[in-house]
Image (cartoon, grey):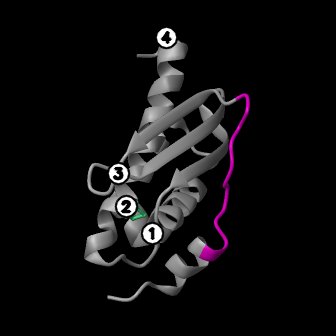
Amino acid sequence: MMYTDKVIDQFQNPRNVGEIADADGVGEVGSPACGDIMKMFLKIENDVIVDVKFKTFGCGAAVATSSVATEMIMGKTLEEAEKLTNSMVVDELGGLPQEKVHCSVLAEQAIKAAIKDYRSKHGQD
Ligand code: FES
Ligand code: FES
């Protein structure tokens, strides 16, 4: 399977790349399948995600899936963002080659880890 136009666009023009210095929640995860790393930064106000940035040592599929995942959770409540799954991200991109699906798991896990970090700092766990 080839990459869809959406995957190529998200890879070539990734949204929300970078760091948030005063992030309210930070999540860092690694992929057991390839050893790549994903870091997610969240800015949260009243349990709503008002800003999100990511950084990755990962492949093009990791960049594209994280980029679209940040767009999907921007402005959402923590409860909504926690429901985001890697298959929702892959669907949004119009599919990924099977051997690249593990890359999309990084975004989901990093978002969940960042929310967990926020919750543990705010007595919500
Ligand atoms: Fe490292 Fe894919 S294995 S970028
Ligand atoms: Fe490692 Fe894609 S994130 S191969």
Determine contact: label 4, label 3, CB under 8 Å.
Answer: no
Label 3, label 1: how far apart the Cα atoms are:
14 Å
The residue under label 2 is which amino acid type? Answer: Cys
Percent x, y of residue 121: 53, 15
* Mark 2 crowdedness (10 Å alpha carbons): few <14, some 14-19, many ≥20: many
Q: Residue at x 32, y 57 (%)?
A: 34
Quarter of the figure that contains the N terminus = bottom left
**Residue that label 3 marks:** 35
Numbered range of the magenta stretch: 12-22
| Secondary structure found at label 3 | loop
Residue 98 in sight? yes
Q: Residue at x 66, y 62 (%)?
A: 15
**Along the polypeptide, which appears first: circle 1 or circle 2?**
1
**Residue that label 2 marks:** 103
Percent x, y of residue 105: 35, 54
Q: Is mark 1 within 8 Å of ligand 2?
A: yes
Residue 61 image label: 1
The residue under label 1 is which amino acid type? Answer: Ala
Q: Nearer the viewer, mark 4 or mark 2?
A: 2
Question: Is residue 13 in the magenta section?
Answer: yes
**Along the polypeptide, which appears first: circle 4 or circle 3?**
3
Percent x, y of residue 104: 39, 60
Label 4, label 2: how far apart the Cα atoms are:
31 Å
Q: Is mark 2 within 8 Å of ligand 2?
A: yes
The residue under label 3 is which amino acid type? Answer: Gly
Question: Is residue 59 in the magenta section?
Answer: no
Label 4, label 3: how far apart the Cα atoms are:
32 Å
Q: Nearer the viewer, residue 80 or 120?
A: 120
